[in-house]
Amino acid sequence: MSQSSPGLPAPHIRDAGAADARGQGIGGALVREAIEGAVRSGCAEISVSTMADNAAAQRLYRAHGLTDESLLLERHL
């Protein structure tokens, strides 16, 4: 994704879902709407986060054109 322009919002999608709804197209519809809403609002980029081991969510986001841009490292205390 491109760098966000100063003053323009950069929405962020938090991972949300239900295992029993997987495969019904709901996640894809939500991601498409989030991207379309960001475009309509004039946003320069959109970001998502998910757990490193959530391969299904990563496939979903990549299928909608999102790419790996950064790495977040954490230490739980």
Image (tube, helix red, strand yellow):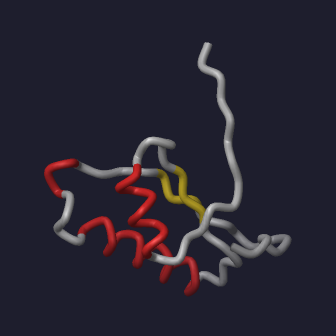
Residue at 70 percent across and 78 percent down: it is 44
In the rendered structure, the answer to whether residue 56 lies left or right of residue 23 reads right
Residue at 31 percent across and 75 percent down: it is 29
Q: How many marks?
A: 0
The answer to which of 39 and 47 lies nearer the viewer is 47
Q: Quadrant of residue 4?
A: bottom right
Q: Is residue 77 above or below residue 28?
A: above
Instruction: Name the residue at the right extreme.
Output: 6
In the rendered structure, the answer to whether residue 13 lies left or right of residue 60 reads right
In the rendered structure, the answer to whether residue 72 lies left or right of residue 60 reads right
Q: Is residue 37 above or below residue 62?
A: below
Image coordinates of residue 75 in percent, x first then y, are 65, 22
Instruction: Name the residue at the top extreme.
Output: 77
Image coordinates of residue 40 in percent, x first then y, are 55, 86
Q: Quadrant of residue 32?
A: bottom left
In the rendered structure, the answer to whether residue 20 lies left or right of residue 46 reads left
Residue at 46 percent across and 66 percent down: it is 61
Location of the N terminus by quadrant is: bottom right
Image coordinates of residue 70 in percent, x first then y, are 71, 54
Residue at 51 percent across and 43 percent down: it is 52
Location of the C terminus by quadrant is: top right
